[in-house]
Image: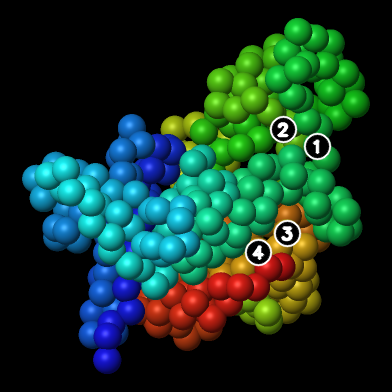
Amino acid sequence: MARIKAAVIFGGTAREHELSLASAAEVIRCIPKDKYEVICIGITRKGRWLYFPGDVEDIADGTWEQDTDCASAFISPDPLYRGIITIENGEATIRRVDVVFPLLMGKKGGDGTIQGLLDLSGIPYVGSGVLASASCMDKSHTHMVMDDYNIKTAEWQLITQREINELDARCRAIADEMGFPLIVKPANSGSNAGTSLAENYDELLASVKLAFSSDNKVVVEKYIKARKLEAAVLGCDMPVCSPVGEIISPQIIFDPVNFNVSTGDDLRVPADISKETEKKVQETAIAAFKALGCKGLARLDFFLTEDGELFLNKIGTMPGLRRNSVFCKLMAELDYSHEELIVELLEQAVDNADRNY
């Protein structure tokens, strides 16, 4: 019986490049080679696509792109080919692909861009589609959808690039309406890069300018002093939610240096919360997952205040997938081994390729 051809795409131009490499290396190790033929496609920080035939350890340590056997490659948007075209010595070779695992986070990857290309190609892929990926990446869209579905998020305001000429007045209006402290973040960012805490007007103006250096839209949120809870959702038609975990860390969410502190090392699972609160988190996670049209997998961050109010913070449609990542540790509580989880994601991608939510 022929093996299933699974392409793993990793790297990318976003800040999350190294996280993507680490996840890809562990995912590739987990794919059973007796059932799957793995095809590795790496994207350099400058955006060059390369077919990589080398050792998975070179992906893990970032030296993969120095392999002399790498060749230019790209996914054909023509569904006739349903695969990857490699170019070596001036000759093009078509490599048919049955399923793609797009392990890309951040801009030009986890924001719907790679998903759009894969939709054109006709190749099934792991994770959410174009709209869900884009809506979860764009924090203003996440807020708008959650507002529509009566799912609590932090009080928020949006500043667009068209308002730059009146930035001073806009910031003063936000300060008057929302007060301080405030969290200021680029609307489109897969990490906390460009995110700041503002405790007065001068800091607000500076934080907005900093956020604009990363995106053309800026989201300003009321700071919420709270515990940070985590949930993982898996599935398509009938998604399931993991037990709830809690991030226990001295780092603060807006620290631009530690932009991705919640790597799994600081996760306590199960969280020390009541059964009623855990049920509420799980129900809200699935409701948000469905409202945004997600499928496959997602990691959801929540804030829980001292008086028991629950707020959705953000949704990641392609979370880190190292064995020790938050998503994987939460799914382990549902008795998924790392290997079983990766195979489940590949299988459901094929089974649900034609479904839109």
Q: Which mark is residue 90?
A: none
Q: Which residue is mark 3?
A: 292
Mark 3, secondary structure of its residue = loop
Q: Earlier in the sequence, mark 4 or mark 1?
A: 1
Mark 3 crowd level (few <14, some 14–19, many ≥20, 10 Å Cα): many
Residue 357 lies in quadrant: bottom right
Kindly tell me whether residue 232 is visible in this rendering.
no
Residue count near mark 1 (Cα–Cα under 10 Å), binned few <14, some 14–19, many ≥20? some
Residue occupying the point 33% across, 58% down: 84
- According to the picture, the residue beneath numbered tag 1 turns out to be 156
Q: Earlier in the sequence, mark 3 or mark 2?
A: 2
- The relative height of residue 184 versus residue 260 in the rendered view (above or below) is above
Of the residues shown, which amino acid type is indicated by label 4?
Cys
Residue identified by numbered label 4: 294
Compared across the picture, whether 279 is left or right of 336 comes to right
- Viewer-side label of 4, 1: 4
Q: Nearer the viewer, residue 178 or 344?
A: 344
The structure residue drawn at horizontal position 76% and vertical position 25%, both measured from the top left corner, is: 159
Residue kind at label 2, given as amino acid type: Val
Locate residue 200, reporting x and y percent. 74, 18
Look at the numbered discs 1 and 3 and tell me whether their residues touch, using CB distance below 8 Å.
Answer: no
Q: Which residue lies most toward the left here?
A: 68
Q: Are marks 1 and 2 in contact (CB under 8 Å)?
A: yes
Mark-to-mark CA distance, 1 and 2: 7 Å
Sequence-first disc among 1 and 3: 1
Give SS at disc 4: loop
Q: Nearer the viewer, mark 1 or mark 3?
A: 3
Q: Are marks 4 and 3 in contact (CB under 8 Å)?
A: yes
